[in-house]
Image (cartoon, rainbow, N blue to C red):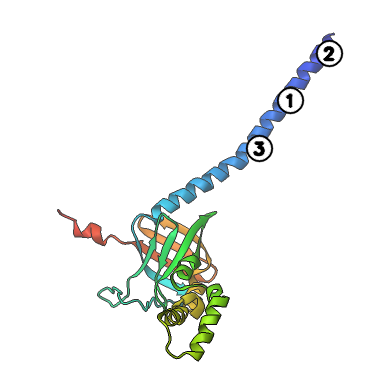
Amino acid sequence: MAVLVEQIRQFHFWETVTLTFMINWDMKRFIPLVFIILLSCSLERELVKGNWIIFEGIYLNKNIEFKSTDLLQVANANGYIHANLDFFEDGSVILPGISCSNIRAQWKIIDKRLIMVIDSAHYNNSYGSEKDYASAEYSLLMKLDSLDKSDTAKQRMGREFQQMNPLLTHEFDAAMDIYGNSFQISIDGDNLFLKSETTCLKAQKDRTIDRLFEGL
């Protein structure tokens, strides 16, 4: 009987040791995961606090010229263009144009890396997608237009929108070669650093409004 009791005690002892080991092992795996999630949330909160001004951009060891084709661009006293990088809580971001108009994109942080992809839905909803223009209805309209030179407003609008959709004109291709990378991201105070295999972007938080109210 004493032998049986001792065996039961030993069984419970090793069961407890095994359970403790499993909990510790899971915690070792769980704690880094929690840290990564908290860090990502912290980076996301910092990104959307105001907008950023890129003060240096390098792509394939060459300086990037942020020359947007949009109507309004602000330059400093030295003539350097203020390239605004605006992140929003809904996951959208406005990327400064590089020999193109500013780009509407979507952003996400995964494992301390910033991913930015062009917002195709936004442009296709605004101008129509390649699928729309390949539809039977659109093809019929174009055939009718070739026969009837009167040209209806709907037909004219369809052609104009097809010519305007930057996804179909490939207006953003060169710029997205730069922005469409997986970036290591770090934020140090008012400074934002993005680095990929081909690109390095450095930006500062825009404090223009804060300076306007200094001393009030």
Q: Secondary structure at mark 2?
A: helix
Mark 1 vs 2: CB contact within 8 A: no
Q: Residues within 10 Å of mark 3 (few under 14, many from 20)?
A: few
Identify the disc placed on residue 15. Answer: 1
Disc 2: which residue: 4
Q: Is 141 on the left or on the right of 97, as rendered? A: right
Residue nearest the observer in this picture, 136 or 27: 136
Q: Where residue 84 sits in the image (x, y, percent)? A: 35, 67
In space, the residues marked 2 and 3 are separated at their CA atoms by 32 Å
- Tell me which amino acid carries mark 1: Glu
Q: Quadrant of residue 53?
A: bottom left
Q: Residues within 10 Å of mark 2 (few under 14, many from 20)?
A: few
- Tell me which amino acid carries mark 2: Leu
Q: Where residue 121 sits in the image (x, y, percent)? A: 49, 66
Disc 3: which residue: 25
Q: Secondary structure at mark 1?
A: helix
In space, the residues marked 3 and 1 are separated at their CA atoms by 15 Å
Quadrant including the N terminus: top right
Identify the disc placed on residue 105. Answer: none
Instruction: Please give the name of the residue rendered at 27% of the width and 76% of the height, measured from the top-left corner.
Output: 78
For marks 3 and 1 on the same chain, the one whose residue lies earlier in the sequence = 1
For marks 1 and 2 on the same chain, the one whose residue lies earlier in the sequence = 2
Residue nearest the observer in this picture, 65 or 174: 174
Q: Secondary structure at mark 3?
A: helix
Q: Residues within 10 Å of mark 1 (few under 14, many from 20)?
A: few
